[in-house]
Image (cartoon, grey):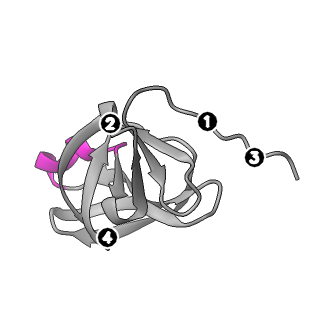
Amino acid sequence: MGRLFIESLNGAKIFKCKFCKVDTASHDDIVSKDFQGRFGRAYLFRNVVNISLGPSEERNLTSGLHTVNDIYCSSCQQILGWRYEKAFEPSQKYKEGMFILEKERMLKDGW
């Protein structure tokens, strides 16, 4: 088994995994703060780091049917949110390739 590569993010405001405190996303990559996740409020991000993807599955979410992958912290394997792989509604296509991080599963660093 190889060593785990953990990417560190630069910037003043960083989101970290609540469980192991590994960098996950930059405040600069937030697209929207107006999302709902499994555990409450969630944020939509353009880019996240230090995650692994679960298998693709279709889910009927608040905004319609989507193909998504759950995302896990690559360090501690806790579920952090999901990635939008495909949106079936034309108005939701902007989410494809973006990530939802659950606010409840994140720590803010540098705020």
| Residue type indicated by callout 2 | His
Q: Are marks 3 and 1 in contact (CB under 8 Å)?
A: no
3 or 2: mark nearer the eye: 2
Q: Which segment did they paint magenta?
A: 89-98
Q: Which residue is mark 1?
A: 7
Task: Of the two numbered discs 4 and 2 on the same chain, state the one appearing first in sequence.
Answer: 2
1 or 4: mark nearer the eye: 1
| Element assignment for label 2 | helix
* Residue 60, x across and y down, in percent: 25, 72
Q: Which mark is residue 27?
A: 2
Q: Are marks 1 and 4 in contact (CB under 8 Å)?
A: no
Secondary structure mostly taken by the magenta-highlighted segment of the chain = helix
Task: Of the two numbered discs 3 and 2 on the same chain, state the one appearing first in sequence.
Answer: 3
Q: CA distance from mark 3 to mark 2?
A: 24 Å
Q: Which residue is mark 3?
A: 4
| Residue type indicated by callout 3 | Leu
Q: Which residue is mark 4?
A: 59
Q: CA distance from mark 1 to mark 4?
A: 30 Å
Task: Of the two numbered discs 1 and 2 on the same chain, state the one appearing first in sequence.
Answer: 1
Who is closer to the viewer here, 104 or 88?
A: 104
| Residue type indicated by callout 1 | Glu
| Residue type indicated by callout 4 | Arg
76 relative to 106 in the view: left or right: right
Q: Residue at x 55, y 67 (%)?
A: 78
Give the number of callouts.
Answer: 4
